Image (cartoon, grey):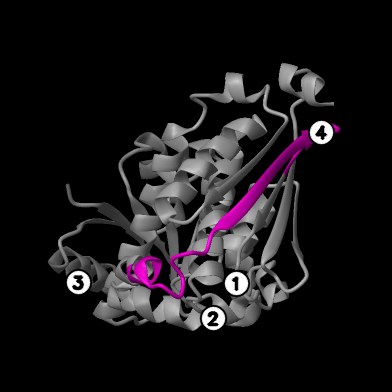
Amino acid sequence: MSARLLVVDDDEFVRVLTQEILGQCGYEVETAEDGLVAWGRIDAEPARYDLVLLDKQMPRLDGISLLRKLRADNRFTDLPVIMLTADTSPEDVSQGLAEGAHYYLTKPSTEDMLQVVIKSALAESRQKRDLRALVGRHAGTLALLCRAEFAYRTLAEARDLALLLADASLDPARTVVGYSELLINAVEHGNLGISYADKGRLLGEGRWADEVEARLRDPDYAGRQVRVILDKSDGTSRVTIIDQGPGFDWAGYLEFSPDRVFDLHGRGIAMSRSMSFDSLEYLGSGNTVVTTVALPAGNGGQSVCS
């Protein structure tokens, strides 16, 4: 089934051109001339659109105001929003990221860039929805889990472990995406040595998954594992993730950076820190990350582990 996109822009020429380009790429594309019209359509049919391309400067309801309304509504938690705008100053970019934009594209954007960014955003959104759909199945039993240690190698194992850790946190809808981001980072960047620049290039070429699988078979990396320690005590769920890589310069990834806003990746750590956990801290060279989540008051798991 083709993804349905909503293009929101007060410039008729931009709306028509973008609709034509994306239509030729196989998407179903609808348009709205400002944020107020767009909100009316999205609010009336919350499941109608798979992605929104959003201009910033518009009459009646501008792009940032519409983005705030979307992010304040739980129905649209995983609806990807791409800012398609001529406003690219660091201040404007930082504002859009802080309000919850997934990507930025400058106007005009090439057809190739539109396709790559939209494909990436849709894939990320599907992964998040799939994860959230699976959480909560064992939350009752895992409330009794006080301490555990795990070791894993692959991305599939990372996803499964993210689901378990999320259920153990007793706040799975909030934490599952954050755990998934960090566990995947530990494999691809830590154990497999795929650099930030390498990942951007591989995503653009559509070869990221193939490269991960190739390195998992490579004798130089095949024996590496990520260790994970879960410790629930004193009213918190503390998860420590340790990979076998050399580490990285993590400080610049804790906040949303305008320098990386036009990249296809690089927001996972900042999003996890701001949305999934009560605290997130890297230790030493960066191959160890510790997250904490406050356990809900009054649950059985908390009293058992205290």
Res 264 quadrant in image: bottom left
Name which of mark 4 and mark 2 comes first in the sequence.
2
Callout 2 secondary element? loop
Image coords of residue 209 (percent x, y): 33, 65
Callout 3 secondary element? helix
- Mark 2 → mark 1, Cα distance in angstroms: 35 Å
Image coords of residue 255 (percent x, y): 69, 67
| Label 3 close to label 1 by CB (< 8 Å) | no
Mark in front: 4 vs 1: 1
Say few, some or many: other residues with alpha carbon within 10 Å of mark 2 (under 14 / 14 to 19 / 20 or more).
some
Magenta residues (range): 214-238
Residue, disc 1:
245
> What residue is at 38 percent from the left and 81 percent from the top?
201
Residue, disc 2:
88
Is 28 in front, or is 131? 131
| Label 4 close to label 1 by CB (< 8 Å) | no
Q: Is residue 90 above or below residue 123?
A: below
Q: Is residue 33 visible?
A: no
Say few, some or many: other residues with alpha carbon within 10 Å of mark 4 (under 14 / 14 to 19 / 20 or more).
some
Is 90 in front, or is 178? 178
> What residue is at 34 percent from the left and 56 percent from the top?
122
Is 32 in front, or is 223? 223
Q: Residue flagged by tag 2: what amino acid is it?
A: Thr
Q: Per the image, is 235 magenta?
A: yes
